[in-house]
Amino acid sequence: MATLYVSPHPDDFRSLLALIAAEFSPSPRPRIVTEDPPAALKARSRPALVLAAAGDGDSVLSGASAVAWYLAVQGKRAGVDPKQQSQVWQWLSFADNELTPVSCAVVFPLMRSSRAELMRVLKVLDQALAPRTYLVGESVTLADVAVAAAVLLPFKYVRALEPSDRKAVTNVTRWFTTCVNQPQFLKVLGEVALCEKVGPVTAAPKTEAQLKKEAKKKEKLEKFQQKKEMEAKKKTQPPAEAREKTTFYQFNVISALPDAYSPQYVEAAWYSWWEKQGFFKPEYGRESISKPNPRGIFMMCIPPPNVTGSLHLGHALTNAIQDCLTRWHRMRGETTLWNPGCDHAGIATQVVVEKKLKRERGLSRHDLGRENFIQEVWKWKNEKGDRIYHQLKKLGSSLDWDRACFTMDQKLSYAVQEAFIRMHDEGVIYRSKRLVNWSCTLNSAISDIEVDKKELSGRTLLPVPGYKEKVEFGVLVSAAEQMILEVIVATTRIETMLGDTAVAVHPADPRYQHLKGKMVLHPFCERKMPIVFDDFVDMNFGTGAVKITPAHDHNDYEVGERHNLAFINILDENGLLINVPPPFLGMKRFEARTAVLQALKDRGQFKEIKDNPMVVPVCSRSKDIVEPLLKPQWYVNCRDMGKQAADVVREGRLKIIPEHHLKTWFNWMDNIRDWCISRQLWWGHRIPAYFVTVNDPAVKPGEDMDGHYWVSGRSEEEAKEKAAKRFNVSVDKISLRQDEDVLDTWFSSGIFPFSIFGWPNEDLSVFYPGTLLETGHDILFFWVARMVMMGLKLTGKLPFKEVYLHAVVRDAHGRKMSKSLGNVIDPLDVIAGISLEGLHAQLIDSNLDPVEVEKAKQGQKSDYPSGIPECGTDALRFALCAYTSQGRDINLDVNRILGYRYFCNKLWNAVKFAMKTLGDKFVPSEKAQLSGEESVSDRWILSRLCAAVALCDVGFKAYDFPAITTAVYNFWLYELCDVYLVGTALVSEVCRQTLYTCLDAGLRLLSPIMPFVTEELYQRLPRRKPATDPPSVCVTPYPDTAEFCWNSEEVDRDMEFIMTVVKTVRSLRADYNLTKTRADCYLQCIDAATVALVQKYSLQIQTLSYSQAVIPLTSNQPVPEGCAVAIASDRCTVNLMLKGLIDVEKEVTKLMTKKGDLEKQMEKLREKLAKNDYKEKVPAKVQEQDAEKLRQSQTELEKVKEAIENFRKMM
């Protein structure tokens, strides 16, 4: 059995790390010993793990990281594959180097800036955890154990991390709580209580408040200065409008790079240049698109947005992801087509134009007639319909606009007609009378996706179009149906009682067994109705007896079918009552609700009314209450098509990503219902079906319901010939009436992937099937499934090979985007910025009622008190991709988008600085390669570049966009800018070539996500081969691992150690407020190898840590007195010389005051605890808090005494 030697101290996070990791390891677990390991084992430090009884050095592991890693591997908690193992190791390093120093320092009272440093590091962690439950993968790994152990002290002690601080890092708090409540954590730590109340005020509250005040003042002053500087720069900067008028070559060659990054300036002209150069066309750089490309083809069609629509953040997310993928494939040399298109949006467009007609001319569509109304719609489309295309261009979408399609174009309309006729001739499309979702306001059936489910908790008054007063919903009315004995039924729609044809009870309900075979009498029309026994009845709902209205309820419809009941329709298309006795005949449906209730009361048959939680179906277009209505409609038989669609996924021919959507897919496809494709509209594809009347007495007249009397045709002549053949009469005896209805918009969308290429008349071989379909998971069934079904049915091929479904965008609070909440944001407002007043003005222009407008205004005022700042397209795209974690909704915070605008500014300044360093005469080598003369800094930054290239390659292939953004962000910000540019003297030719390689490849890596700023900066770089290199970064090869193959684990490992030392020195400097003063740094190393490593990187350490001198010491060499000490790692201790740099006496005086105050507070607390009635009178929770306060004060007092002792040694 192995033996684990750990520290007995309860707060030794290194030992805790090993102990928790041990709990995850398989049995038998190591024996725990809280003593120093025997000297013979040569264990350098605790924790130490002895794997064998003998003193063999190979069987002893020392140090928290080594021990924990070994135990985690044993317990399968170190990652399931090399990628995850690498991520776990990175988090282990993060815990050791970033978190541990600040976590320890923050409880030390001297170090005033430590909490700010801790919050900075925790916010980095918070961002990483935003889309995740755990740091790596879907379960606890060593990454979680290490980081949780590192933040344990701050979460336990108020002084370190107050409740208000925890609110700023909610993801970290949520994750930490999840971790420490795992059984393995609980066994080692016990219950970890997060402090809920700030501890007692200590000696220097005034000083701290003053410091905060001064910091605030300084921050305001800096912001003011920055604003003034920006205004001054804007005056000297060429405006965006002027820039748009210049040619590419003029602004590329003549104008210098402006001093500051401005999104408006950068994004003004590049898109039109890209378009003019033809970069977005698959033909670019190719002799013929039909000629095979060895690199392959990438084809994707856009989910066609509604012609009436304007962009929202959901569109922005869709297009950011799609454009990133398209640009990446294009840069990989593939023949790339992203095909744009727009949907005619039948209902939405008709409603918009009808409202416009009513508002401007006081006319309805019926006043104009069908043909004239359709002309008005086309006129509106030609004037307003391309707005969405302009918005997509603002987002940088690299679509081939010459191939843009509109679903009502002649080519696509022909394909729609052909699809209907083929499927009708085959019997897949048929005529039937069934219940549909009916909007009385629109006078049309609507699809399920156009029905909003409004949840009510009880009695609620809702506005309904056409009614002055609000209508009551969310109540359950009980009333009696008469017979020899009375049966009380319950209903939420009392007006539909007029169409009842039965009463249903559950077969197992003992209350109604005596009623088998009985009839009841309808209260209003003397209709005898059977009592039927059906399993669908819920015995616990109401009285257990429910009225059955087969013609006006989906469940009742099925009951009616099963029991052969009468179907009595009591509503016309306008919502007026028909087929009912007076006085209800002709009443509006909700006026009848009140009248029926009153009539029941008058007859003495009303029993009770009570609140009832329910879901009310509301038309998303008209806000009308949707009615189930029996209508003859056209249906698609989906049974065989649905089975095919399920089978292609089961067989792996179609891949759906993320895989958790498979359950939904199979559930829909395996239980699919037939699809109603009729819509009672004028705008859309008119159904090419004709009702046949045969002018021959030998042929029986047909009914609308009878599919035998319907034929379809590409023209009336073709339909007549089909009809004549079917009824065996001459053509002259046939009269036809074309169906007035149009097809569901989803029908034309379902064939979009091949109709855009001219099916059935043109060759589809080049771009069909497509490669990928990317869209939101909310239309998986409505669009994706139908494309798959219709593609297989009509072409025999899948329309695409993969489906990637992104998440739904929510606001920063996790709420669904809703106009009434005021949180629906136009991406263009994020790009250009907008004032709070501007946001309010948009609400006033919307169709919200005044109450909702005020509510939305309050929401906007709360979320955007100063409006939305200008963020730019690149920052918005980067933020959306960074948020896109597979399978999770996206809580989008505009402030985070602004953070990525600052990243753009960092890029801008870095390239500007680098270009100045390279000089005007710099000539890059023809190929990126190692010369063999690179310094360790050069080798390291090139190794980090290669790592970023590899991560981006894996990320794009796996649709892991956060991995891509993180890799590029970390390379540019934390490695190139923060380390290489700062810590390297860029004087040699090799350094300059290395810097150029990083800039060139770094911009190419970032280009698919941030196309504008990367193009602007890339154009400033000299070319390796000016005569032959591509003219734009967007058609330049994307960096790949074959070219960038200079990874060096040794250099990475060495530099990781060096950066740990640097961060430790920086942390000490911050703790002692050494802002400008350089101090000597003595690095005490554990062995000669570490001394050699420190000497090798001494210049980097000196530069990056802002030290006066870096002096490596062996473990035997003494450290001069007057140093502050911090442990960088188990190999190195940092000693920062403070003697002579700070006023020691002044610091000691402050600490003595603090010590006295702490002792007084502890004395008062002890007196309180010692009172006789304390335990009886004081609540248990308060007693726990008092005990915790005393313990914290004791810990703080010990730290103060230790600090005083350290300072006195310097005196």
Image (cartoon, rainbow, N blue to C red):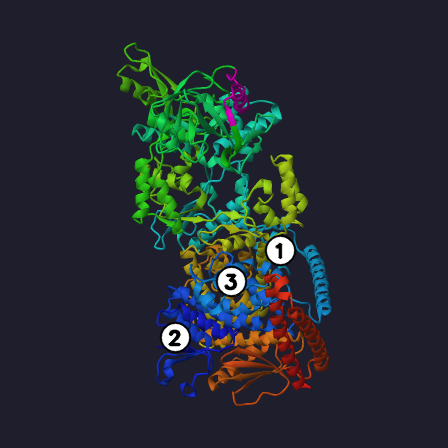
Tell me the mark number nearer the camera, choosing from 3 and 1: 3
Instruction: Tell me where residue 1053 appears, x and y as whole percent.
Output: 46, 75
User: Left or right of 901: which side holds 515?
Assistant: left
Distance in Å between CA atoms under marks 3 and 1: 39 Å
Up/down of 399 relative to 10, above or below: above
Q: Residue 86 appears in which quarter of the rendering?
A: bottom left
Between residue 554 and residue 183, name the one nearer to us.
Answer: 183
Instruction: Tell me where residue 210 appears, x and y as whole percent.
Output: 73, 67
Evaluate whether residue 1120 shows in this view.
yes
Up/down of 425 relative to 828, above or below: above
Up/down of 557 relative to 644, above or below: above
Tell me whether circle 2 and circle 1 mark residues in contact (CB < 8 Å). no
Evaluate whether residue 771 shows in this view.
no
Identity of the amino acid at label 3? Phe
Q: Which mark is residue 222?
A: none
Mark 2: few/some/many CA within 10 Å (<14, 14-19, 20+): many
Q: Which mark is residue 176?
A: 3
Between residue 942 and residue 782, name the one nearer to us.
Answer: 782
Residue that carries the numbered disc 2 in the rendered image: 30
SS for dot 2: loop
**Which portion, as a residue range, is magenta?**
583-607
Magenta region, main secondary structure: helix
Q: Which mark is residue 262?
A: 1
- As drawn, the residue found furthest toward the top would be 697
**Sequence order check, earlier mark of 3 and 1:** 3
Identity of the amino acid at label 1? Ser
